Structures are given as structure tokens and as C-alpha cells.
Image: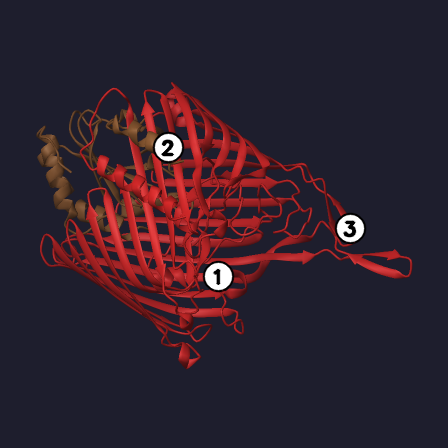
Chain colours: A brown, B red
Amino acid sequence: MKKALTLALFLIAGFGFAQLPSVKVKDMNGNEVDVATLRNDGKPMIINFWATWCKPCVLELSTIADEYEDWVKATGVKLYAVSIDDTRNTAKVGPFVKSRAWLYEILLDANEDLKRALGVQNPPHTFVVDGNGNVVWQHMGYQLGDEKVLFDVVKKVAAGEKVDE
Amino acid sequence: MKKHILTGLSVLGLTTITYSQTPKENNWGTLTGLAGADVQFYTRDSIIGAPVVPEKMRMNAFLFLNYRKGGFYAGARMEFYQPKPLLGIDERFQGQGIPYYFAGYQYKGLDITAGGFYEQFGNGLTLRSYEARQLGFDNFLQGFRIKYNVKGIYIKGVFGRMRDFWTWSRGTVRGIDAEINFNETVPKLRNSKFRLRVGGSFVSVNRPDGEKVIGQEVLTLPLNVGNAAGRLNLGYGNFSLSGEFAYKFNDPSTPNRYIYKPGASALITATYAATNWGISVGAKRIDNFDFRTDREAVGNRLLVNWVPMLNKQHTYTLAASIYPYAVQYVGEQGLQADLNFTIPRGSKLGGKYGMDININASIVYGLDTTNRPSRATVFGSDTVFTPDRYGYTSGAGLGKEYYQDFNIEITKKFNKKWKLTVMYMQLWANLNVLTVSTLGKDPFVHAHIGVADLTWRINNSHSLRIEAEGMYTKQDQGSWLMGLVEWTFAPHWSVSLMNQYNIGHPVPEKRLNYPLGSVVYNMGSHRFQVSYGRQRAGVLCIGGVCRAVPAANGLTLGYIGSF
């Protein structure tokens, strides 16, 4: 057991992670979307895992919504809000988002395939992806004020600067 | 024992250190991972009814690695539950190992997986394998899966056994699912306002049980039990309608008391979503639909299918964890309506930021059933009555009331500094069904719950959140009060203090306080948590599946990190 674990550690030390995985999710019309093909004309993307029942998620997305148009104007960023609601709530996602007039791209990951592939445990969990589809930053949870840090990262990525943890 | 724990912790620690760095790209492929550990130290506290934990300390930990290169993917999850799983998690998880591992390949529309996999057909009425770690729920299938899609036609096939703690179910699951998305298949419909998807699935469980002897009866058990479902999603513009109907062949089992009646389920949901408002209305009927890889399994063990709940998923403490509703797979019927609307920005009531309102109502009844009469058999001078093995017939009427819930939630951001959410809820819960009854003398609870949740954003990094909740009821354990103060210092720290007080308990000595303090440190994708205090006995539900949370007192250390 111990040997196997040591070996596993050795192996993972050699790898990096970067590209968005080729995992399929659905858009609000039920059409399949391959996450690896998500692009935003070379501009940054935010991938945010959320759920209708998750209070900090809704707080984060509604806080960002107040500034989203400014963010888009400044950096061209596009936010993909990936709902991990199960089939109990998937039908509610549309009315929930539309009533709040959120301008995000909504994706549904009801079988949690993308959640598993990106190593997400609990929502909210936010990734920043550069113009080439590389994951360059991630953050778990949301506290008021975190959106400033997120926007700083997005601005750096948009300007082609290196991002620190 | 200690050695195992140390090994586990050191792996988690080393991994964290290795991957706290910014990700790097190279052509070795990409690796992601998730690691977590929860350690609880228990203090004796008999007054709240906390079970005695002789080990004093228990730990749940895991490390999940996921590797991809081109179309190839593989992964594994190590799990540790030492010296025993945390209180409330099934003790049969005790131990450590690598239960979940898989490898697969994707090429164009084809995707083949060998090893463990999670899959769901439609709404889950025929098949849903998923993991809910906090519940100790994990029913992945171990075997093979093949997925193929071309031009909006999706086909999936699965074959395997189900995880049963550290072993596999005796029963084997075989299933197939197909769906056509006409908007992808028919070029003319590609950008149409009209949307149509049609799908169907068939799942069969093979259980080589032979016969079952109950008293004088010898029951011949079906070797294979099939469960078939058809579904439809129809949309036009802002309107959509979806439905699924499933039929299960006779499946005598412990949960249905070995009856041969076939099962049937129907779900239907309609939604309309426009700017500033949206509504969803749903109905369901579940009749004898418990479907497992082991007919003697009960509780949350070895479930093949999943029935979505038709109630709001509450998150405020008193609303979520005292009388939550859990789906009754053996039979129930219900209705739900959920309305969201936003009073627009700039209006008198909406102010600068608008006001979000959610109104939700749901009601669940049992089925209107008539038991079939027993048969009398004469053995010499004795007459033995054996139950009719068809079980019962169900009519179109209503059975007993199980649960009812009406709630309204309003969120208003006043300015950049202040935000308030208020919620009022009224519920009726039948404790004979919800199995959380503590007194037993009054099985029906009627409660009013009020919540105020105020956030004060002091500046860009400091904020304070105050939550006050109250539940008023004359039944069961009586009324509760709850208060929480949470101070956040973004981006790293959060400190909270919470107390729950059972102010209305009919026995004055049981009017107890449950204080709990927590400190959270967040660093990028790593989160550390320390909490100390009392945990109230209650129910934890995720997605309509619930487990009892026993009372506990002590220190909890938690870590979760993604890389």
C-alpha cells in the first residue's frame, strides 16, 4: 500500500495540468457541449461551478452580476456557470437564471462528469481559463471580496501576464 | 492503525505541497486531483445523547487522481476510514483501499470506460450511480460502459456490479439508454425555437437468489428484474415540458415486503422562463419503485435507481436538518410549484439592485392503496393465513399526507454594503414517514420557520454576516432558535459562532444549547477548517437522500484541496 502511494506521488510529480478536459455537458437547450472546445476568441473565460440550492454560489454569481458588464467591457471575459443541480432541480435552473437576468452562459453537469474531471468537491469552485483553453487559476468557496481577487486574475490573463496562486 | 493514518495524512500533505504551485503544461498529459480529510475528536456528552466513541478520534480521508492525455483517461480514488468512519457514516466503510479506479478512451463520438463509473439515465428512475461523500453514499458501477453519439443520437450501454462498501454487489446491472435530440439531428431545427428530445432506457438487474422461505411460504424469486422508461423533453421559446414514465417488472424485496406487484413511476415538469420571472410546476407519482442490486438491502445501500424529490432543497439550518423530506421509493405522489421573480432595478421597490423573490409550495401524499386479502390454507387441523403476494392495488386517490411545505424567500441588496434575505416557511411533516420522530406520541408536526440573514460588507475584504432563525412548533421536540455570526476577512479567513437552542422542548431539562465555533482558512483551492462544539442530532440530506446525523461533541479538523 505504502509503496503504491509513493509510486503514485513520484508519477504525479512529473505532470502538470492545464487543458480543459474533453468532457460533455449540456447547454440550456439540451444540446451537448464538449468542454475542451470552449473558446472565447482568445480572451479569458471563467468556469464557475454552482447550484440553485447553494447560498454562497448564488451570492457569488449575483455579486459578479452587478459588475459583469464592466468586466466584459474591460477584459472580454466570458463566464460559464456550470450547474451541478441534479434532476430534482435541473428544470428550475432556467427560471432561476432568467428571473435574475444573469448574462452568463449556463451549462448543466447533472451527472457530475465535469465536476469529477476537474477535481471539484463542493460548489462554488471557480476556474480561470486563458485564451487557449488552459486552466491557469482556481479557487474553492466564496467569501465577499473574493470577486476582486478573481477579477484581478482575469485582468492579468487578459493582458497575457503570468498568474500566481 | 496509527501507521495507516500517518501514511494517509502524509500522502495528502505531500500532494498538497507538490501542487500548491501554479499548474504547468507539458506533453505528459494533464493530471488533476482532489484530496480531503476530516478528523473528529469526540468528547463525552451524554446529555445531548452523543454516542460514546471509544476510539476518541476518527478520520475519513480520500485522494482522487484523474489523468488525461488526448483521448485516454484514467483515475483512481484512495479512501481511508480509520480507525473507524466518522460518526454517522456507515461503519462498514471502516478500512482503507482503492475501491474506485478506471481507464477509458474517447475517439470522436465513442467513449469506452473500464472499471468504476458513474452514470445516469434520464431522471434516474431506471439508473443513477453517484457519490455523495458527506452522506457516505457511493453506488458506482464496476464493469464496462460504452457511449456513442452521432448527430444528436446518444447511446449508452452499461454492465457491472455495484460498490458495496469494500466489496461488490452480488447482483449485476445491465442497462441501455438512447436519446435523440432532434435539434441536433435535423439540420432545419438547429436554430429553431422548437426543441424536442426523446429518450428511453432499459435496465435489468440479475440476482441469482433462487427461492426465499417466509414462514410456510416458498417464494420463487425472479432471476432478472427489468426496469424500462421513456422520456420526452419538449420546448418552444421560453416554455418547456418534460416527462418520464417508468415501469418495473415484479421485484419482491425486503423494502416492499416481498410482493410481486410491478412498479410504475411518472414525473412531469413544465417551466416558463422570461426575463425577470420564471415558474416551474412539477408532479410525480411513485409506486413500488425501490430497485436494488440486492433485494435484502435497505436504507441507502445498493440502490440502482433514484427518484428526484419534488420539494425545495432548503439550506438554512433549521429548515434543512430537522424535518427534511426524504423520497419514499415504495410509494408517494406529489406536486410542486416554484416561482422566481425579480422586482427590476430602478423601480421603487427594486431600488438600485432589484429584489429577488422565490415562492415555493409542495405537497406529498402516500398512495391510495388497498391490501389484497390473505389466503387461508388448511394444514391438517390448522389454518394458516398467507398474504396475497401481489400485495396491494393502488387507486387514483390520495393516501395519507406525508409532507407539505410552503415558503417564501426575499433577497434585497440595499446598497454596496447591506444585503438582507428573509425567509418564511410553514411545514407539515408526517414523522411516521420521515423516521426522525423522537417522541413518537405526536407523529404529525406543524411548524413555522422564520429566517433573517443579513450581510454587512464593511469594506472590500471585511464582511459580517448575521443569521437568525426560529422554528415554532408545539409537537415533537418543540421550538428552536438559532443564531450565527460570521466574520469574513477575504481572501483567507472566516470565523463563525453558531448556537442552536431547543427553547420549546416539552421536557425542561432537554432545553439544550448547541454552540459551535469554526475557523476557516482558504488559500486558492485549499481549504482548512477547525470547529469545536456540539452537533445536534438531525438529518443531513443531499439530493433527496438523507442520513441521520447523530449528536456529537468535540473538535473537528477538515481539509479539502484541489489541484
Residue B313 image point, x, y percent:
38, 54
Give the amino acid type for the residue marked by disc 3 in the picture.
Glu
Q: Which residue is mark 3?
A: B217
Q: Are marks 1 and 3 in contact (CB under 8 Å)?
A: no
Residue B461 image point, x, y percent:
11, 53
Please give left or right for residue B121 compared with residue B527 in the image.
right
Q: Which residue is mark 1?
A: B403
Please give left or right for residue B168 compared with residue B70 in the image.
right
Q: Which mark, by number, is residue B255?
A: none
Please give left or right for residue B103 compared with residue B413 in the image.
right
- Answer few, some or many: residues within 10 Å of disc 3's Cα (few below 14, many 20 plus, some between 14 and 19): few
Q: Which mark, by number, is residue A3?
A: 2
- The answer for how far apart the CA atoms under marks 1 and 3 are is 36 Å
Where is the C terminus of chain B found, in terms of image quarters? top left
- Which image quarter: residue A36? top left
Q: Nearer the viewer, mark 1 or mark 2?
A: 2
Q: Chain of mark 1?
A: B
- Which image quarter: residue A118? top left
* Viewer-side residue, B172 vs B402: B172
* Viewer-side residue, B89 vs B443: B89
Q: Secondary structure at mark 1?
A: strand
